[in-house]
Image (cartoon, helix red, strand yellow):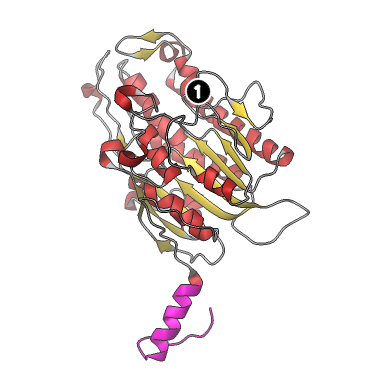
Amino acid sequence: MAVNNHRGGERMLELCFLGLDGFAAEMVFADENSGRWPNIEQLAHGGLYGASECEADHMFTGPSWTSIYTGQPAAVHGLIDLWGRPLTGAKTFRTVKEPYIWDLLNDNGLVCGVIAMPITYPARRINGYMIAGFPSPTLSVTGGVGVPDDFVVDHSQVIRQSQKISGVGYSFHDRYALDEDLEMLRRSELRKAEVVADLLKQRPVDALFVQYSCLDRVGHELNNYARRGIPYHHERILEMYDWLDVVLLPQLLSIRARHLIIVSDHGWQSLDVPMDCVGRGTAKVWGMHHPLGVFMFLGPDVPADTRVDCRNIDVLPTIMEALALPVPDVGGRSVLIRQSELDEIDKHLAALGYIEDHGER
């Protein structure tokens, strides 16, 4: 995906940022899952890859995505509520003072498309367009782009439109069986990918930010049915990774960009629960978030098959350095590695006789 040539007049993005909510390092890099997801593995080994760690006290949507967006820890940006609400003095998307990554790119002349990134309600006016992510009580769009009637920002919002039931969540999960629920989730993610592709044709941008939540959502849906006495089977989460690998990921990677980054806000614990541990009406959440999400980065001069672990606050400065733009003074630091720098080190070591000189790579 990260190549340097144009084809058939097609405009290439400078940056494609894919947010995969809940994409879990504990699953993707587990020995027992080796070979199960060939497309994910090929993508990872095409550049830098590793775990992206969020703050242990803030390993959930609002704070972690905002740390990714700003390069600052939660103590600095101040958005510490799960859903970005102004509880007990917490900041919101409206009131966070630190610049977001798309603001910095705008300042450097790049037009941005921001689509369904979590905790971006209400959508801001930027140089480009923004479709606010969940939780969005109403569809919120800036930049003059059209959104089809069947576009779903996030599957969780469909669920929240049903009646709230104390102790077990929402009536949606009484109306639909688990398999029906997960099929709707998959359909909405595929539809989002189609809408994104259409928007890029109508309104090309330099940098695209888009988020898909199926890997996180499947775990939460299992929890919703577990509260109703339906056993929690961890394999269903792995099956969603199977679907991502075979069906959704190829569509996402059809977008051509010089730089591709895939990152998640947190991971998901790899566990299962015996059937007799789950009772009707149980409020306990069996599967839960894990601090280690996934980080992947491909681009020009980025070495292949290079393990690099980072923190969520390192994502912004890494992007800025990769795009040869000024890196702001933030809490994170760039973890970018360049192949040309590695080659220079090898030449130096070869000249000193420490390694064998194999010439230019």
Is residue 357 inside the magenta stretch? yes
Q: Is residue 286 left or right of residue 84?
A: left
Q: Name the residue beneath numbered marker 1.
A: 136
Quadrant position of the N terminus in the picture: bottom right
* 169 relative to 146, above or below: above
Where does the image place residue 308, in percent across and percent down from the top left?
A: 38, 59
Residue situated in front as seen by the camera: 28 or 310: 310
Q: Is residue 120 visible?
A: yes
Q: Is residue 223 above or below residue 216?
A: above
Give the residue at the far right of this rendering.
8
Residue 46 in the magenta stretch? The answer is no
Q: Amino acid at mark 1?
A: Ser
Viewer-closest of 314 and 31:
314
Q: Quadrant of residue 193?
A: top right
**Residue 213 picture location, percent across and down:** 47, 34
Asked whether the viewer can see residue 42, the reply is no
The picture places residue 227, in percent across and down from the top left corner, at 30, 18
Going by the image, does 197 lie left or right of 88? right
**Extent of the magenta region:** 340-361
Query: Label 1's element?
Result: loop
Classify 137 as above or below 213: above
Total numbered badges shown on the rendered structure = 1
Label 1 CA crowd tier, 10 Å (few <14, some 14–19, many 20+)? some
* Residue 209 spot, x, y in % from top left: 55, 42
